[in-house]
């Protein structure tokens, strides 16, 4: 898993431009799931995680993952600090630039902690061992008579103490302990892991001093805004720049050609007309003053309302069989006591992070320097090397804080724009998207239609389950004409149901992409979570059974004598989170008039989540009163951060359920800004109760995303419970609710 | 034209069009980047500042509006803002942190005007500020705690 080595200080300085004394440790961590991992040659050492302890005692972690609100800088630092027996006040985090030397930096898939916890711990433990060795040498005593305690090494024979900062000079002369000798702490001895730690960035966040991409200021930097074709992939036919050129502060107006990525790679950029100016505002004003005649292209006829009808017709007919089913649904349906059918819809969605897409770039002859809020700096770097034909080693990407990402900032089209403009104007430039640009030119979370048909026997058991799904594939952004959802997408909650279904069939229907499609927090689980949980609820009511009990009965039963692999789905854990949530919510309690309870469970990113929502519905006004959520995410690295993430996921899932909808007319997105693409606000926030299962001996699993997919179905099921009205099409504001 | 404005007690002479929104003067000309751009149309509150103590969306007022007024931004300091910073930290409020400048300014305006705000007062005072990460429940808790601290100090 990891390989730890001391880096020669001068080499380190030369390599990374970080001038400071003390111990610097690096190690290799793999970031992909084991089965996809290429064999690592143990002779070829390429460290990608770094920790440094300097003579002032400061412990600096080089964070290789982007911080976008998920608390990763704090979480990873806490793992090192724990094994190092560090005092938290000495722990600092520095953001890594985008470089292959840091391993895969793509921050998505709720996988940072999952893949990096152990190497982080080992590195902290290795540093601690070196400090102990150094102290033992100094005191001329045995290492066993030394122990590490809160940034000191203690001589257990006489209680003398040596501060870490005073030991690093000596420690840096020592060999790094052999991997096999590194002993990790026991769960019971954890000081930071599994506890509540505050963010390392609180001071910056509360004083306005955290530097996001949009805050970068480079000497002689210009600002730019880009007008893009209202219809996806349209192009500039001609444009008049007179009026824009007259806007005070505007210096240049240039056309940007669309850059089409090679198949299977990158994101390219849409192209359009860029206005360069001395302030962001002047660039925005110049852009508005442009008079552009567009070639609207073939997506001009794309109308989301019609597409919804098309997808609905398709899921009502037979689709392509997806392998992995079992039994025979048709015979189950023939023998059924009761048949239930339903069709569900999710619209297109935009991420709308509070910080709009932006990037600052400086193209200088044979090198490129970029400062940007990117989730995936390495892909951005490769992409720049490809499009601008600059050797990759001459491209530097500084990762700033991200003012939210949610998947949008893993697509670096805005970085490509900045570099293209900088190249043309021969000066550093910051491209800033307006909110309207962000809403209208996103990589959208796909719309979907699902048809479900289920059968119940006389006892109300589910005997058959047919599910047909259709949604434009993310693959279409990499490979045109990818008209069916791909295997990895269906793998997110569709292909392997967590339910015990004696007869199960999954079909995939055609869904072409007429917008740029991308991933958004929890991705396809939004569709599967909504379809599966809504339908189970419908089946429960049809069977006249309690929905929580119905879920419990329907979950797969584990065979006692089968040992499950650590990350293998385990029904018992799902039952535990559901039972825990039902207990918290006092499920079955007598509710006030107009109130309803709804339940949803979902397994995603290896984590188990159950949510119960209590709503009140008065005159079609839906109010979330209480939300109860339990997560089993294995080892809970930073409990307060996990709670914060789940509270956030509650609001994110609530926003999409209540308001989230991107629609098009004549190919152009109809929404503009927060007034017509709305978000939940303070007054909408329910009481949120989060419980984290105590699973400190299980490996850590995803946290950032798994809280989202349960929200929409739990809300809709609660509305049904309160009103008897079944919502099968999101968002709620689209079907008469407020 | 030259415009004189005062930000956090410091005078600035700015050469700009008088209809330039205050936000962009603060960010791009004065160079204080703690005040954020979120929507440009007074919908999200990321750009919140105090103008002579009054909560203002700086993206939607021209700089000329700030003439002879005191502009207070997140880079500034006041008794109430410092208390809020403290309770924001105690509650580990921020996730991505981007909207928190505006949230803190809006909360400062609330504490400056209402002694004992109720949940409804907080909802109302904070309704103009979007947090896409969804930190609302923590913000509310931090405001209540700040009020308690402030009132204790005032006793």
Image (spheres, coloured by chain):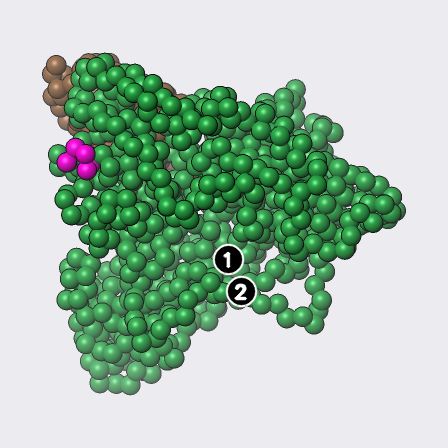
Chain colours: A green, B brown
Asked if A103 appears above or below A281 in the picture, the reply is: below
Query: Residue A332, position in %: x, y?
Result: 82, 49
Instruction: Give me the residue at 22% from left, 22% from top.
Output: A282
Query: Residue A562, position in %: x, y?
Result: 67, 70
* Dot 2: chain letter: A
Instruction: Give me the residue at 42% from left, 30% from top.
Output: A232
**Which corner quadrant of the image does residue A344 belong to?**
top right
Q: What secondary structure is found at the residue carrying circle 1?
A: loop
Q: Are marks 2 and 1 on the same chain?
A: yes
**From where the camera sits, is residue A460 visible?**
no
Label pair 2/1, CB-CB below 8 angstroms: yes
Q: Which residue is mark 1?
A: A701
Question: Disc number at residue A698?
Answer: 2
**Observer-nearest residue: A406 or A300?**
A300
Q: What secondary structure is found at the residue carrying circle 2?
A: loop
The quadrant of the rendering that contains the C terminus of chain B is top left
Q: CA distance from mark 2 to mark 1?
A: 9 Å
Asked if A165 appears above or below B128 in the picture, the reply is: below
Query: Residue A597, position in %: x, y?
Result: 68, 37
Question: Disc number at residue A74?
Answer: none
Query: Residue A486, position in %: x, y?
Result: 55, 48
Left or right for A611, reference A268:
right
Write the start and end of the magenta stretch as one range: A422-426
**Observer-nearest residue: A642 or A407?**
A407
């Amino acid at each position: 898993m990891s390989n730890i080595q001391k880096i020669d200080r001068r080499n380190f300085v030369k390599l990374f431009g970080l001038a400071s004394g003390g111990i610097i440790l690096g190690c290799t961590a793999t970031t992909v799931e084991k089965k996809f991992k290429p064999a690592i040659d143990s002779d070829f050492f390429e460290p990608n995680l770094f920790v440094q302890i300097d003579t002032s005692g400061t412990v600096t972690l080089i964070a290789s993952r982007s911080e976008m609100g998920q608390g990763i800088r704090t979480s990873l630092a806490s793992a090192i600090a724990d094994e190092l027996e560090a005092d938290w006040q000495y722990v600092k985090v520095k953001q890594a630039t985008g470089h292959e030397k840091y391993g895969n930096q793509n921050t998505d898939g709720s996988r940072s902690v999952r893949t990096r916890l152990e190497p982080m711990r080992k590195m902290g433990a290795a540093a601690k061992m070196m400090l102990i060795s150094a102290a033992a040498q100094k005191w001329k005593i045995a290492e066993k008579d030394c122990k590490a305690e809160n940034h000191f090494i203690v001589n257990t024979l006489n209680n003398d103490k040596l501060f870490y900062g005073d030991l690093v000079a000596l420690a840096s002369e020592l060999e790094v302990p052999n991997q096999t000798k590194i002993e990790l702490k026991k769960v019971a001895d954890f000081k930071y892991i599994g506890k509540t730690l505050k963010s390392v960035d609180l001071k910056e966040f509360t004083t306005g001093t955290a530097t996001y991409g949009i805050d970068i200021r480079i000497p002689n930097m210009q600002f730019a805004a880009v007008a893009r074709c209202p219809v996806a992939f349209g192009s500039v036919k001609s444009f008049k720049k007179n009026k824009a050129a007259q806007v005070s502060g505007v210096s240049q107006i240039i056309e940007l050609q669309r850059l089409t990525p090679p198949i299977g790679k990158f994101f390219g950029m849409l192209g359009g007309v860029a206005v360069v100016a001395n302030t962001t505002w002047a660039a925005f004003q110049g852009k508005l003053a442009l008079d552009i005649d567009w070639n609207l292209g073939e997506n001009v006829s794309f109308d989301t309302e019609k597409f919804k009808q098309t997808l609905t017709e398709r899921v009502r007919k037979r689709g392509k069989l997806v392998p992995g089913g079992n039994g025979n649904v048709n015979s189950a349906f023939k023998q059924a006591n009761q048949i239930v059918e339903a069709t569900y819809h999710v619209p297109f969605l935009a991420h709308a992070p509070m910080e709009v897409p932006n990037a600052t770039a400086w193209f200088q002859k044979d090198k490129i320097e970029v400062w940007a809020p990117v989730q995936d700096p390495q892909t951005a770097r490769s992409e720049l090397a490809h499009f601008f034909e600059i050797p990759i080693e001459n491209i530097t990407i500084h990762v700033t804080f991200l003012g939210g990402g949610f998947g949008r900032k893993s697509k670096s089209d805005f970085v490509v724009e900045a570099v293209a403009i900088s190249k043309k104007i021969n000066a550093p430039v910051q491209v800033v998207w307006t909110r309207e640009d962000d809403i209208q030119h996103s990589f959208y979370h796909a719309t979907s239609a699902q048809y479900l048909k289920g059968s119940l026997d006389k006892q109300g058991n589910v005997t058959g389950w047919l599910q047909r799904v259709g949604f434009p594939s993310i693959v279409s952004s990499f490979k045109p004409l990818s008209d069916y959802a791909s295997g990895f997408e269906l793998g997110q909650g569709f292909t392997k149901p967590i339910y015990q279904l004696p007869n199960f069939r999954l079909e995939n229907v055609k869904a072409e992409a007429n917008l740029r499609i991308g991933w958004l927090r929890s991705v396809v689980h939004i569709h599967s979570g909504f379809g599966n949980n809504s339908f189970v609820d419908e089946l429960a009511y049809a069977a006249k059974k309690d929905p929580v009990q119905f879920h419990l009965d329907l979950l797969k039963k584990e065979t006692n004598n089968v040992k499950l692999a650590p990350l293998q789905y385990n029904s018992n854990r799902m039952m535990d989170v559901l039972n825990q949530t039902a207990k918290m919510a006092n499920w079955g309690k007598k509710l006030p008039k107009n109130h309803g309870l709804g339940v949803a469970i979902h397994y995603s990113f290896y984590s188990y989540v159950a949510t119960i929502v209590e709503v009140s519905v008065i005159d079609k006004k839906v109010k979330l009163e209480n939300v109860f959520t339990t997560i089993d995410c294995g080892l809970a690295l930073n409990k307060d951060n996990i709670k914060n993430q789940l509270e956030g996921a509650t609001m994110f899932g609530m926003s999409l359920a209540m308001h989230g909808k991107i629609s098009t007319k004549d190919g152009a997105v109809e929404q503009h800004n927060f007034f017509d693409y709305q978000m939940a606000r303070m007054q909408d926030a329910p009481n949120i109760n989060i419980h984290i299962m105590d699973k400190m001996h299980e490996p850590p699993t995803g946290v950032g995303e798994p809280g989202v997919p349960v929200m929409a179905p739990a809300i809709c099921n609660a509305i049904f419970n309160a009103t008897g009205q079944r919502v099968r099409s999101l968002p709620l504001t689209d079907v008469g609710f407020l | 034209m030259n415009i004189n404005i005062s930000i956090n007690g410091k005078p600035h002479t700015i050469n700009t069009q008088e209809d330039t929104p205050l936000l962009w003067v603060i960010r791009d000309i004065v160079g204080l980047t703690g005040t954020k751009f979120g929507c440009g149309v007074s919908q999200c509150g990321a750009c919140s500042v105090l103008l002579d103590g009054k909560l203002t969306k700086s993206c939607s007022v021209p700089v000329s509006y700030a003439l002879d007024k005191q502009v207070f931004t997140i880079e500034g300091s006041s008794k109430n803002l410092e208390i809020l910073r403290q309770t924001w930290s105690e509650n580990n409020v921020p996730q991505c942190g981007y909207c928190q400048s505006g949230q803190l300014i809006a909360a400062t305006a609330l504490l400056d005007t209402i002694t004992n705000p109720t949940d409804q007062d907080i909802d109302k005072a904070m309704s103009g500020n979007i947090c896409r990460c969804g930190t609302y429940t923590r913000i509310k808790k931090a405001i209540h705690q700040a009020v308690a601290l402030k009132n204790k100090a005032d006793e």
